[in-house]
Amino acid sequence: MSSKPPSNVPASAKGAAKTAITPTREENYAEWYQQVIRAADLAENSAVRGCMVIKPWGYALWENMQRVLDDMFKATGHQNAYFPLFIPLSFMQKEAAHVEGFAKECAVVTHHRLETGPDGLLRPAGELEEPLIVRPTSETIIGDAFSRWVQSYRDLPLLINQWANVVRWEMRTRMFLRTSEFLWQEGHTAHATREEAVEETMRMLDVYATFAEQWMAVPVIRGEKTAHERFPGAEQTFCIEAMMQDRKALQAGTSHFLGQNFAKASGIEFLDQNGQHQHAWTTSWGMSTRLIGGLLMTHSDDDGLVLPPKLASVHVVILPIYRSDDDRARVIEYCRSVAAELRAQRFSDCAVSVVVDERDERGGDKVWNWIKKGVPLRIEVGPRDIEKDALFVGRRDRAPKDKQSIARGEFVAGVGATLQAIQDGLFARALAYRQQYTRTIDTKEEFYEYFTAPAHAENAPTPIHGGFAMTHFSGEVQVEERIKSDLGVTVRCIPLDKSEPGVCPFTGKPSFQRVVWAKSY
Amino acid sequence: MSSKPPSNVPASAKGAAKTAITPTREENYAEWYQQVIRAADLAENSAVRGCMVIKPWGYALWENMQRVLDDMFKATGHQNAYFPLFIPLSFMQKEAAHVEGFAKECAVVTHHRLETGPDGLLRPAGELEEPLIVRPTSETIIGDAFSRWVQSYRDLPLLINQWANVVRWEMRTRMFLRTSEFLWQEGHTAHATREEAVEETMRMLDVYATFAEQWMAVPVIRGEKTAHERFPGAEQTFCIEAMMQDRKALQAGTSHFLGQNFAKASGIEFLDQNGQHQHAWTTSWGMSTRLIGGLLMTHSDDDGLVLPPKLASVHVVILPIYRSDDDRARVIEYCRSVAAELRAQRFSDCAVSVVVDERDERGGDKVWNWIKKGVPLRIEVGPRDIEKDALFVGRRDRAPKDKQSIARGEFVAGVGATLQAIQDGLFARALAYRQQYTRTIDTKEEFYEYFTAPAHAENAPTPIHGGFAMTHFSGEVQVEERIKSDLGVTVRCIPLDKSEPGVCPFTGKPSFQRVVWAKSY
């Protein structure tokens, strides 16, 4: 086993006394994650159990993700709509596997007003005849609408997306990754044939993979879930899986082929071209604010958040550096003119977004503030830079002290290309990391050793070890459960780009292909 | 009293046997409203009491509204964030007037899972220690966050907006106007001084008025609410009020100056420049999907929805008209090329949005379909139009049959100006309507007569009468309550553009200015 730390620690920062984040990834990965969120001011825990507050810097990132995804959904023919937050209890019961999957963790509304009790305190009053569930997902309530909207084959395909909040009463929560309330989009579609529904399922999986790789710079493996990990009520669940820097897998998006299960449960029927009644074939697919956690854990380092330029709401921050009031006016004026020039440049179909940080605070504090927030490019400008008409430029994908003086005109003209280079570099680095920690394993012994031998920092509360194991599997649920209980490792997905058949090292039986095994979020 | 029907019934449609909407506005205004929504496919009632489904055509309108408002908020220095859906019961209790205002109509979550009972049916389980309220508005939960975010005067002003769903358990609901769940934005800001908070309150009222008038083409009166109609917990509530075609007022947006009430309740304190602890001054302001109802009732007619071009997601629909298959290909090709030319034109900072309706349905059905959906411009193209290289154009602000043949080049070059003319015309028509039904009244007798004498259609379930009465008022709550109980009329607002002092006809006491009295939604 390699004992190198994750490769995207900037070389020059290794061993340096100062990093912005305490602890480092190696020392305590889980705590590092929380501290990156805090240092970047992305979000915070709220007074409501398991619910977070998404702060402006975090929400701006979500808005950018939404905008890109929404455009992709519309380009593939989908329309947005909005359905009720509440689901009648009776609706949840319509699909047996579905209720089984969600009943254990849902918020239940039972009353519709408050009254003051004899103790002078408020208490629930006005009990509802039928309790309402705060939606954990909307298959049943949207299915009810679809049953009215779909009458004839002419009404199909029906391609709908919803941006919404959902609630799953999680017992152990972690900001972005697992919260009781989260924001997401859920696509719901109905089709006349199995083939069309399967095609839609795969189309949206592709949209998700494209978004993850081209926008988030997060390399993903497309695959199918085993029956064990399937969405409750689905016939097939497809997913994209990414590797985080602790080598655990994060499921970044799922696309479900629901067969006719929900159409039968909700009565989505249509008259086909031959005048026959048919149940529709449906799909659903979703991505959530969890992606922000995945983005963070893919790119960030011991200095804080690293944003991929294509999703950053600020591409360039300009920091005026001066000592006297005389200098101040001159330096700020220069910075503003550079900002104006940069804003006239384009990157990724948008104007380059620039902030001039004119706050009266220490220069060093301001620099670190923006490093921790993950802004791709920092420009420091002092009187000497103005004399040379040059900019002192730092890139977030390099070490904090690795800065370069670049002629103003050259930097401005090349800013789009530089941002693209950072974007591409982040993807390449994450892909190399995943490849480094993906191992083809053919024996049970090596498999167990891979997921138990700590690679480094043995005393860390959560030693980092293992990665993705590409190992044959003959598909028995009991084997999956045994390995999960032994190692905390599960089949993350059965990759779509199939490898050759072989032998399952756990059962000795034939296996169609290697699958991805990993610990996961 | 004039007995003319509302002036935006296209003249040529009057008395025509066919209108798209049954009943007409005169026959039954409330039912007309529901039928316009249905005919335009904007929304529908759901299986959940008081909650609606916003269908794609309605949601696209909301998305356009959101985009424009969001840009206006950002241009005035606000940032978006997201706060929990749930509010602990104890938070609601912190501000006495506030809980009083919302306790009677809120959804209460009391359990966090479901279990199967002895009868085999699901029932709530896992009772929460503290019940949670589904937010009816977020002053208290955002106040809790602000109490952490605000420490020093340097942290102020804090300018936050949230796009969210909220729930108020309304007993009598009507789509868009009053639903148990609705979508809105809520701005929440904190300031160091009373003056700055008041300035913010008025700034956002201006933003709302600008949005209503320039984008929705809905003329509004800016004013202050009386104590009776104030937001629970506010020191002052300002609003914009619009007149609907049944001459009732609709409150289209509110901006509240909250004084230090919520800052004290939530502990939003800061250290001022002299090192003294101070409570912040806060504001809140909101606009909701209710606006869609207001837009509908301002512009729509007995043929259906009328969309102001600046918020329409489709500006122009092109309808190929043909009889033979030979014609079909040629006509559709021509339509597509016209569409491409139109899309290269600009209107209101966007590309002109065009749909070619190639569905294989009867031409007349298709035309009516788009009339009912409110699309500003319809172009019919048949073989003869192609020969002339001309387009047969209908405008939604004119009667359905009032169509004109316009040379293709001329129409394309002028499409932006035509859309602007429709936008301006809708505003002018709505303003003229409001002026027509606004009366300056100085005696109690005339006031009572104004709001009781039906102007026309006396047998209609809801006879239309009255309008806005500009009448002096000396401000007594009992007088307001008496008039409300006698006539169902209330003070909609005390206009900001003050008229001269006078005498209140109800009390004989001096009055500072005339106020707007009306029935309302």
Image (tube, coloured by chain):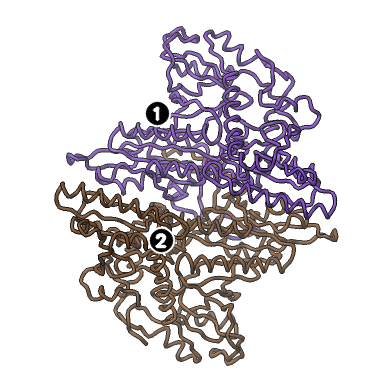
Chain colours: A purple, B brown
Q: Which amino acid does label 1 sit on?
A: Gln
Residue B118 visible here: yes
- Where residue A399 appears, x then y in whole percent? 72, 31
Residue A199, relative to residue A345: is it above or below?
above
- Where residue B132 appears, x then y in whole percent? 58, 50
Residue under pointer 2:
B175
Mark 1 surroundings: few (<14), some (14-19) or many (≥20) residues within 10 A: many
Please give the label number shown on residue A236: 1
Residue A90 visible here: no
Residue B155, relative to residue A240: is it above or below?
below
Please state if A314 lies on the left or on the right of A135 as rendered. right
Give whichever of A418, B134 is nearer the camera.
Answer: A418
Residue at (53% x, 13% y) in the render: A440
Q: Quadrant of residue A123?
A: bottom right
- Where residue B358 appears, x then y in whole percent? 26, 49
Q: Which amino acid does label 2 sit on?
A: Met
Residue at (65% x, 46% y) in the render: A46
Chain of the residue on which disc 1 is drawn: A
Chain of the residue on which disc 2 is drawn: B
Residue at (34% x, 46% y) in the render: A146
Residue A241, relative to residue A65: is it above or below?
above
Give whichever of A222, A365 is nearer the camera.
Answer: A365
Residue A153, relative to residue A300: is it above or below?
below
Residue at (74% x, 32% y) in the render: A402
Give whichever of B444, B420 is nearer the camera.
Answer: B420
Quadrant (top left, top right, bottom left, bottom right) of the C terminus of chain A? top right
